[in-house]
């Protein structure tokens, strides 16, 4: 039961960290709109930190779900018929979400605004 509690807590905290990082990431579009001559804005350090923390927490959730899955197979019970598929789905979702957050940490999407009025044009 402790593994399930750890998995739920770490997954929830990871989602919260990712939501906060996306909120900070969206502020860059305002920075780009303010300076009309820049086509991109730097990625805030806090966004990378929160995304990295979310990826680590999702890894912890995946490990705890894997431990729970092993325990469910080792000690079968009546609840196992429902708990095993739910745990497996949670494990897959956690791992996939972890890879997505990790990708966002390594390669964040550049923010840009439509046409850049200060850009050089060769026409």
Image: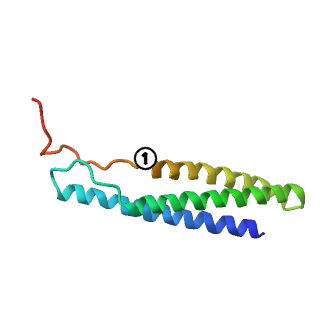
Colour scheme used in the picture? rainbow
Image quarter for residue 86? bottom right
SS for dot 1 = loop
Image quarter for residue 70? bottom right
Q: Quadrant of the C terminus?
A: top left
Is 76 placed left or right of 103 in the picture?
A: right
The residue that mark 1 highlights is 107
- Placement of 7 over or under 89, stated as above or below: below
Residue at image location 86% in from the left, 54% down from the top: 73
* Image location (x, y in percent) of residue 48: 43, 58
* Image location (x, y in percent) of residue 5: 70, 69
Residue at image location 38% in from the left, 61% down from the top: 45
Is 19 placed left or right of 89 in the picture?
A: left
Residue at image location 51% in from the left, 58% down from the top: 52
Front residue of 91 and 122: 122
Front residue of 86 and 10: 10
Residue 76 showing in the rendered view = no
């Amino acid at each position: 039961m402790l593994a399930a509690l750890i998995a739920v807590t770490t997954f929830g905290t990871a989602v919260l960290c990712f939501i906060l990082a996306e909120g900070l990431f969206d502020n860059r579009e305002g920075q780009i709109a303010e300076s009309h001559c820049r086509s991109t804005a730097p990625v805030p350090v806090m966004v990378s930190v929160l995304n990295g923390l979310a990826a680590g927490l999702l890894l912890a959730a995946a490990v705890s779900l894997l431990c729970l899955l092993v325990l469910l197979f080792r000690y079968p019970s009546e609840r196992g018929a429902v708990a095993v598929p739910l745990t497996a789905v949670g494990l897959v979702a956690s791992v996939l979400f972890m890879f997505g957050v990790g990708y966002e940490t390594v390669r964040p999407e550049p923010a840009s605004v439509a046409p850049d009025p200060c850009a050089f044009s060769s026409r």
